[in-house]
Structures are given as structure tokens and as C-alpha cells.
Amino acid sequence: MISIGMIFIALLYNESLIEYLLRLEDSNKHELVITKTTNAKQSITQESLNQQNFLANKAQHEEDNIGDYIYDCSDVIVPQIQNPQQVHTDFISQLKNSSSPEHQLSAILFDHNLNEKERFDLLIEYKNNQLESPSLMLDIIGRCSDREISCNDDLFAQAIELEGNNSALWLHLANYYFAEKNESMAFDAMSNAIKASEFNDYYYNDLALYMRTSKGLLDVHLSHRVIASIGIFAAKPLWISEMANFCLNNEHLSEQENFLCLEVGKLMEYNASLHIANVIGIQFQEKAYEREGNDELVALLKAKAKKGDNWSTLHNDSFVLSTFDEGLFEYWLDSAINHGEYKAQQLLIEEAITLSKNEYYNPCPVN
């Protein structure tokens, strides 16, 4: 499962994609290594092994008196990537040399040798040479909150013309204005976010882009591509830190300021695609009601946040399974894009349980 813990680990280490991959590769806890077998052996033994593994795993599952059964690939050993730095460098070179706009964008986003100022400048150049992309524009505006990057009103005007009815854009702008110590403009942006009728944060777009462009270009096991995509997922900023600092760390706000934080919190709780953003939205509301002295609602929100973080073994088992079954991983990713992370996790568990009921189902490689 892509858990809250995974996200925080990558954010705390502030790692690039390849650094995250390398750290997981070097860790005995996360290491996945497999002994190679011949295609002939796989074709001869696969069906019988599927059934044997299914029956053995299910019997152990029933003996342990666990509820819903999910096929277990955790003991499978997957081959390490030899010289992963070189593999990544070659991957980026292929992307840069491609005529595909999608590959060119991937080269900009996933090249860990670029600093963020260089990446931003290349994204602006890419934007100016391609058809308008709402998700790319939102990404660019989010990066404006980085102190090393300079943005101007013309860029903001372009973004508003393209995505002016998107609450997520206005929240990025609010964060930028808080970073610039321009609270008046930040409050206006928060107000516009509340009034907007759509909320599209496109948070999973980069993850989906990596999985598309790496397929066929990276000759590695699916689990390695998934681990890399988790690195992208975990390391991508939310671009709300400055706004969060204002709404969560001020004990006294005006009635209007408190209202803005409260309503933005509701927006994030119910509309953001990332679960951690939903939780931060709950915290915005909790703090707003705390400032109002509404202890009853504070207690209800605390309980809601705690309940939302109650991830189970089934979450972990289903996500591990998806690292061996590309169709299952794509099902989770599509669900996350369309319904958000929290709902996607529930759908992933249901699908993993359904697949595991088939005694001939086994996406694990043969050892």
C-alpha cells in the first residue's frame, strides 16, 4: 500500500526519484530479489504451481483465522537492478532523444540531475511550445512557491484564464501569496477557491506519466517501476505549507480569516485526491473550531482524522500484490485519479480479494 508512512518517509528524506529507489534497493527490509528461471520451466510448471500456491496460502490463511484472503507474493525474490544510476541515466537519455512530447515532459520531470530552477525554466519552455495543459499549468503555479523560482503576473493571468474555476489553482496561488507575505492577495485567492465550482489537483498525473513512459523503455521488473512511481508520489510537494502555517499556527485570527481557513479545510477534506491532504483539511477545520471554542466539533474532527488513518493489513497486502500484477496496479491508479486515494485503496482491496478467489491466479514469478 502507498501508506501515509511511505509518503512521510520520502518527504522527510527529501529524496529524488532515483535516491528513493536506491535507498529501497539497499534496504534489507524492502529488498526484492529473484532467482532467474527459464521460460520453458515457467510455461511447464506455472499452472500447477499456481494451484499449489493458492491451496497452501489459503490453508495457512484459514489456519491463522484471517478474514478476507489476498494472494501473497511477499516471499518472492525479484532481481536487483544492476547499476541503477546508469539505468536511470539511460532512461532519461532515451526520453530526451524522443520526438514524443510526453517523453520530453517526462525527461524534464524525472531527471534528478536538474535543480528545481532548471526544471522550472524547462517546464515554462515546454508549456510555451505545446498545447495548453491544465495539469502542467497547475504544477508550474505550485512551483512558484519555491523561493528560488521567480513568477510574474502574466503567468498567473494565463493560469487563471485556463483554470480559473479550479479551486486547486487558487489554493496554489494562496500559498504563493503567503510565501510572499502578501496576506491580502492570499485571502482573495482562498475566497476564490471556496467559490470555484471544480477541484482538480491532478496529483497522480506524474505517477501515471512515469508508468506510461517507463513501460517499454525500462527493462526492469514491474515492482521496480512501481517503487520508482511511489518515489514520485511521495516526493511531490502539496504546495500548501505556507497556507497551512497561517491556518494551523495562529492562535488568534479575525472572524473572516478563521472562516477562510475553515472553508478551505472542508474543500481539502472532501475534494483533494491525496489522503494526507484530506487529513490536513480536517486539521484546518479542527483548528478553526478550536479558535471558536467549539469543543464538540473539535472532538468529532479528531475522531474522524484518527478513523481515516486506520490502515489495515489488507491495504498492505493488496498493494504488494499490485506490484506483481500490472493490471491491478493500473486499476488502483485509475481509481486514485478518478476517486482519490482513500476510495482507491478500498477498491484495490476489493479487487485483490476477488482476483485471489481464483485458484489459478498467481502473478508472482516462479522461483
Image: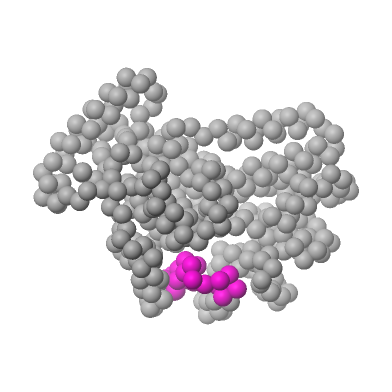
On screen, residue 158 above or below 242: below
Compared to residue 110, the image places residue 327 above or below, namely above
- Left or right: 51 as drawn, with respect to 255: left
Q: Quadrant of the C terminus?
A: top left
Residue 109 pos. (x, y %):
50, 67
Quadrant position of residue 322: top left
For image coordinates 66% across by 72% down, the residue present is: 149
Q: Where are the magenta residues, as a range?
A: 101-120
Q: Is residue 175 left or right of residue 138?
A: right
Instruction: Name the image quarter holding residue 180.
Output: bottom right
Work out which quarter of the rendered image holds the N terminus and state it: top left
Relative placement, left or right, of 241 versus 211 is: right
Q: Is residue 180 above or below residue 59?
A: below
Residue 266 can be seen in this image: no
What x and y, as percent, mark residue 38? Answer: 14, 51
Is 115 magenta? The answer is yes
Please tell me in which quadrant of the rendered image residue 142 appears: bottom right
The residue lying toward the viewer, choosing from 269 and 315, is 315
For the residue pair 175 and 21, the one nearer the viewer reads as 21
Magenta portion: prevailing SS class: helix
What residue is drawn where x is 36% and y is 47%?
A: 31
Look at 51% across and 54% down and name the residue there.
233
Q: Is residue 131 above or below residue 82?
A: below
Q: What's the image's color scheme?
A: one colour
Q: Is 150 part of what is drawn in magenta?
A: no
Residue 209, horizontal then vertical, whole percent: 44, 62
84 relative position to 176: left or right = left
Residue 182 percent across, percent down from the top left: 81, 64
Q: How many marks?
A: 0
Q: Is residue 254 visible?
A: yes
Residue at point 74%, 38% (across, down):
286
Residue placed furthest toward the right: 254
